[in-house]
Amino acid sequence: MVHGELMALRPFGSGNGLVARAAQRIVLVAEGLDPQAICPLEVGLVELGTERYRGALGGYASGTPEGMAAWIRHCAAALRLGVRESTAVCEAMQRGMV
């Protein structure tokens, strides 16, 4: 939610996306969803693509229940993809590939 709120408000002259992603990461760590801060959520956002991100963010900004739900699903999907990526890196390290 913090990511969507910062992007909807756009409180800074520049760097809103960077601040929004950093705030999202802080919340994930603080709430215990990524306590070691190893999940590259940004990888998931990139994999889902800019068009889907903008669509989901537009849904969040609309304030409708459907739009908010779409944003939450989008962020959850990005997190899931980030977890997949960090798992792959850990597995590669165990095999001595990294």
Image (cartoon, rainbow, N blue to C red):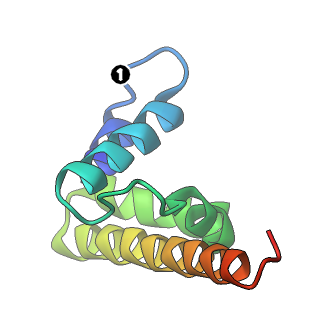
Asked whether 65 or 78 is in front, the reply is 78
The residue at the point 31 percent across, 59 percent down is: 60
Q: How many numbered discs?
A: 1
Amino acid type at circle 1 is: Pro
Q: Secondary structure at mark 1?
A: loop
Q: Is 10 above or below relative to 87? A: above
Residue at 52% over, 34% down: 18
At x 19% / y 66%, what residue is drawn?
64
Say whether residue 15 is left or right of residue 34.
right
Give the residue pinned by disc 1: 11
Q: Nearer the viewer, residue 78 or 72?
A: 78
* Residue 1 x/y as whole percent: 24, 54
| Residue at x-position 50% and y-position 61% | 41
Q: Does 43 sit left or right of 29 as displayed?
A: right
Quadrant of the rendered image containing residue 49 = bottom right
Q: Residue 4, how many percent across, how many down? A: 33, 50
Q: Does 45 sit left or right of 74 as displayed?
A: right
Q: Residue furthest right?
A: 97
Give residue 94's position: percent from left, percent from top: 66, 81
Relative image position of residue 10 (x, y in whole percent): 39, 29
Relative to 64, is 6 above or below? above
83, above or below 7, in the image:
below
